[in-house]
Image (spheres, rainbow, N blue to C red):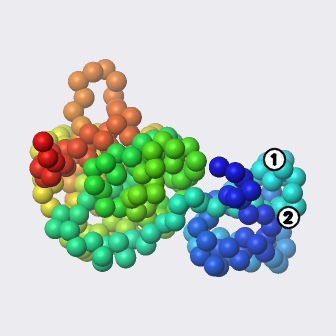
Amino acid sequence: MDNKTTLIFGIRAIIEALNSGKTIEKVYIQKGLSGHLFSELNSSIKKYSISSSYVPIEKLNNLSKHQNHQGVIAKISAVDFFDLEEILVKNKKKNPLYLLLDQITDVRNFGAILRTAECTGVDAIIIPSQGSAPLNADAIKTSAGAAFKIPICKVNHLLDAIYQMQAEGIQIVVITEKTNTTIYQADFNKPTALIMGSEHKGISPSILKIAEVKYKLPLFGEIESLNVSVACGVALYEVIRQRNTYTN
């Protein structure tokens, strides 16, 4: 990807991009930046729940190739995100399948999950606006283009998305090692939302607390866990197996 087409420089330009509905992946802000215009930008970042980080000026200079960045650079997302409520309303399938990713931070894992989700007919992927891997060039490449084919929804909090889905009669299924019940005891012949946890921390305690059912993938070797993208693939194909939607 060419930086000239994926980066926005300058405070006012970024504010206008945010207010116009442009999908911003992340905003990089020079440490120590202040002033009225910066306060306006900061308010917009919070309003639209945009990921941001404070960085030294050297990083901004490197990103901008020394163009006049005014202490702020925004990275435009290559993919537009969808509204979860709109997805839920429009989906008329008898047994829809959704995938929630609880702070997956590795871009290649993210891309691999997107690819598998598209191949298994997942209706939408839901990620939190903060703390997730960026949908950048590496993620898109690893997804083999699936990032452009499957709806991806960004939400402020996964808990809110879960409550919303539960209200729609969708069962919330957590894949976690913190249970004695294997995935092969699950019933996926109903509207389902699978939740996969982060590579290092797993599922957040707050999500584990409200999940309706928890299943694990059986392990028979000495290593205690699978790579999250592999685990996600195993879980999704168990859904497909049960629903018998494949053809020989």
Camera-side residue of 158 and 147:
147
Label 2 belongs to which residue?
70
Q: Considering the numbered disc 1 on the image, is that residue within a helix, a strand or a loop?
A: helix
The residue at 40%/63% (across/down) is 151
Q: x%, y% of residue 118? A: 34, 52
Q: Considering the numbered disc 2 on the image, is that residue within a helix, a strand or a loop?
A: loop
Name the kind of residue labelled 2 in the image. Answer: Gln
The residue at 14%/46% (across/down) is 247
Q: From the viewer's perspective, tell me whether residue 58 is left or right of residue 52.
A: right
Camera-side residue of 117 and 222:
117
Name the kind of residue labelled 1 in the image. Answer: Asn
Q: State the residue lying farthest toward the front.
A: 248
Q: x%, y% of residue 72? A: 78, 62
User: From where the camera sits, is residue 92 visible?
Assistant: yes
Of mark 1 and mark 2, the one earlier in the sequence is 1
- Using a 10 Å C-alpha cutoff, classify the residue at mark 1 as few (fewer than 14 neighbours), some (14 to 19) or many (20 or more): few
Label 1 belongs to which residue?
62
| Residue 86 quadrant | bottom left
CA gap between label 1 and label 2 equals: 14 Å
| Quadrant housing the C terminus | top left
